[in-house]
Image: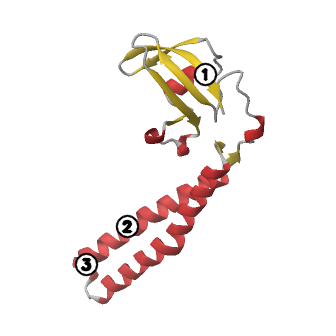
Amino acid sequence: MTVTYMTGEGLRKLKEELKEMESVQRPEISRQIADARDKGDLSENAEYDAAKEAQGMLEGKISQLKSLIASARLIDESTIGTDEVQIMNKVTIKNVHTKKMMTYTLVSENEADLKNARIAVNTPIAQGLMGKKVGDVAEIIVPSGTMTFEIVEISI
């Protein structure tokens, strides 16, 4: 089993999502299946087929979430330092070529949210920044080529 590191907030959100699936979505799909079954011949019943397919997909998601929750290990945020880039750090970087500044928080894969500048630690950029210190330069290979970033600030 793969261990997944995450914050308490991330784990709480996963548990809420699982609860929603089990207590709201699962009964709703069961009701749809029962309604479709009541309409007669199941061999030509598109509603029944769609509801069964939705049930299969939901059960797969539930299973996946349960697995993720079972493998979750909480990150002790009190032990996170800022001498070098690590998970849960907020990192301000400067693109050496364009001089553009960007700030990202490095998080676990399931907590990534690019709109809120939260990137997963397994992305090429995060991997290239891990272990670097303020002032270090990181050359990171991305699909479009190589990008060069200077670490400007590391915070929590």
Q: Residue at x 61, y 22 (%)?
A: 153
Please give the residue where the numbered disc 1 appears in the rendered image.
153
Task: Give the mark nearest the N terminus, 3 or 1.
Answer: 3
Please give the residue where the numbered disc 2 appears in the rendered image.
54
| Image: 30 above or below 88 | below
Task: Give the mark nearest the N terminus, 2 or 1.
Answer: 2
The nearer-to-camera label among 2 and 1 is 1
Disc 3: CA contacts within 10 A as few (<14), some (14-19) or many (>=20): few
Q: Secondary structure beneath disc 2?
A: helix
Q: Residue at x 57, y 17 (%)?
A: 151
Q: Secondary structure beneath disc 3?
A: helix
Q: Position of residue 141 (x, y in %)?
A: 45, 17
| Disc 2 + disc 1, Cβ < 8 Å | no
Q: Residue 43 shows which numbered tag?
A: 3
In front: 77, or 155?
A: 155
Q: Quadrant of the N terminus?
A: top right
Disc 1: CA contacts within 10 A as few (<14), some (14-19) or many (>=20): some
Q: Residue at x 33, y 85 (%)?
A: 35
Amino acid bearing label 2: Ala
| Disc 3 + disc 1, Cβ < 8 Å | no
| Disc 2 + disc 3, Cβ < 8 Å | no
Amino acid bearing label 3: Ser
